[in-house]
Image (cartoon, rainbow, N blue to C red):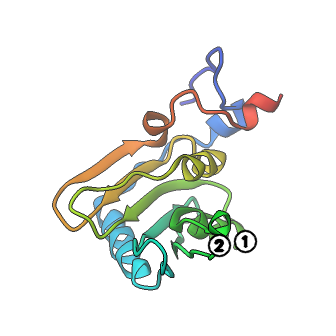
Amino acid sequence: MTKPKSPGSNQSPDRLKAGHRTVGEARIAQLVALARKASKEAYCPYSNFPVGAAVLADSDKIYSGCNVENASFGLTICAERNAIFHARCDGMKRILAVVVYTPTDIPSAPCGACRQVINEFGEDARIICICDSPAKIDLKLSELLPNAFGPGNLG
């Protein structure tokens, strides 16, 4: 069922037609495992904050990524964007879910830049942030990035 475009919505009618698929807990467990594994490959000599991410594409493929820092700090890439760009390179059209792992006691949500990139491919994606404790964040992107700017804003 397609919901009507609301005033100020960033979602174009074509993007709404894709609908929101429920991601099962078994698939989420796979994403969690791959995000944790990806964090082990992080290159983070400056922050010592290894982050791993796993993205579930509409094709049902999973793509993982880790953060890669650079001495020129502005060139650093977050794990989430690393995974998304890898997925797009393989033909991904839409993101269904993103899992982000940080080796902390409380979960860390994606930064603003990552939220914006997720919005480009999955304005209704499920975002799950996990850590080394049972605490987690489990929200739709629209709850983390309300009134987002997106392709629908460009006409």
**Judging from the image, what secondary structure is the residue with disc 1 in?**
helix
Residue at 16% of width from left, 60% of height from top? 134
Reply above or below: 86 against 115: below
- How many residues crowd mark 1 within 10 Å: few (<14), some (14–19), many (20+)? few
Residue 145 point in image, percent of width and height: 51, 36
Indicate left or right for 56 with 155 as reference: left
Query: What amino acid type should be assigned to the residue bearing mark 1?
Result: Cys
The residue furthest right is 155
Could you tell me if the residues under marks 1 and 2 are in contact, i.e. CB atoms within 8 Å? yes
The residue furthest bottom is 41
Reply above or below: 150 against 62: above
Residue at 44% of width from left, 71% of height from top? 47
Residue at 34% of width from left, 63% of height from top? 28
What residue is pinned by disc 2? 86
Residue 110 point in image, percent of width and height: 46, 53
- How many residues crowd mark 2 within 10 Å: few (<14), some (14–19), many (20+)? some
Query: What amino acid type should be assigned to the residue bearing mark 2?
Result: His
Reply above or below: 25 against 87: above
Q: For the residues marked 1 and 2, what is the alpha-carbon distance in whole angstroms?
A: 5 Å
> Which label belongs to residue 89?
1
Quarter of the image for the C terminus: give it: top right
Q: Quadrant of residue 104?
A: bottom left
Q: How many marks?
A: 2
Residue 97 point in image, percent of width and height: 46, 55
Indicate left or right for 108 with 86 as reference: left
